[in-house]
Image (spheres, rainbow, N blue to C red):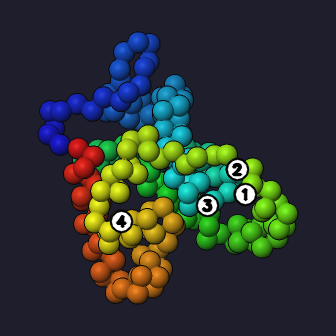
Amino acid sequence: MLPSKKRLLNVQENTHKIEEQELVAQLKKKDQKAIALLYDNYSAALYGVVLRVVQNEAVAEDTLQEVFVKIWKSIDNYDRSKGRLFTWMLNIARNSAIDVLRSKAYKKSEKVQSIDNTVYAEKNSAVQINIDLIGLREKVGALKPDLKEVIDLVYFGGYTHKEAAEKLELPLGTVKTRIKIAIRELRNLME
């Protein structure tokens, strides 16, 4: 992306659009309106990613709150030259969801959960994962099958690179290379 090209968020704040750079500056100043604006515009997409990994609505809601706290506390670490704000937040959400899956408390709660609760939750779940707000599902679907498979496992399934390599019966280096290629292709498709 060219440096002169301004990124405008589809965010209305007092009837004018706000630039991503301006929003980041407000967040770094710890402006509470900025975090509210960020939450209003990105929570649904980030919730979809978290829910896809943890597959439990209550846990996903709690994790989403933790994600926004992490964003608030670590906004000074965001580097515009390394990527878009949404991509940075998406990585925080995904990594937080994976951390929850790996936690002892989560594993213990999953073992203790009754069969009745599981069946009831599956029958009455009306939540659709809506990561397609930015067209992500379509973009991932446009990848070659081998790249799509790796992205689905690692970014949406919560697998580590090593776990994905074992599941796909591929060398770890091959999985990492495919992820790198897929991310590069997705970045090109998003622009």
| Spatial CA span between label 4 and label 2 | 26 Å
Residue sitting at x 44%, y 40%: 133
Residue sitting at x 44%, y 13%: 14
Which of the marked residues, 1 or 4, is nearer the chain's N terminus?
1
Let me know if residue 76 appears in the view: no
Relative image position of residue 122 (x, y in whole percent) = 72, 57
Relative image position of residue 41 (x, y in whole percent) = 48, 33
Query: Circles 1 and 2: CB distance less than 8 Å?
Result: yes
- The N terminus appears in which quarter of the rendering? top left
Which quadrant would residue 116 be assigned to in this image? bottom right
Q: Which mark is residue 149?
A: none
- The C terminus appears in which quarter of the rendering? top left
Per the image, the residue denoted by label 1 is: 122
Which of the marked residues, 3 or 1, is nearer the chain's N terminus?
3
Which quadrant would residue 109 be assigned to in this image? bottom right
- The amino acid type, in three-letter code, at marker 1 is Glu
Q: Is residue 63 above or below residue 85?
A: below
Residue sitting at x 33%, y 52%: 139
Around disc 1, counting alpha carbons within 10 Å, would you say few (fewer than 14), some (14 to 19), or many (20 or more)? few
Query: Circles 4 and 3: CB distance less than 8 Å?
Result: no
Per the image, the residue denoted by label 2 is: 125
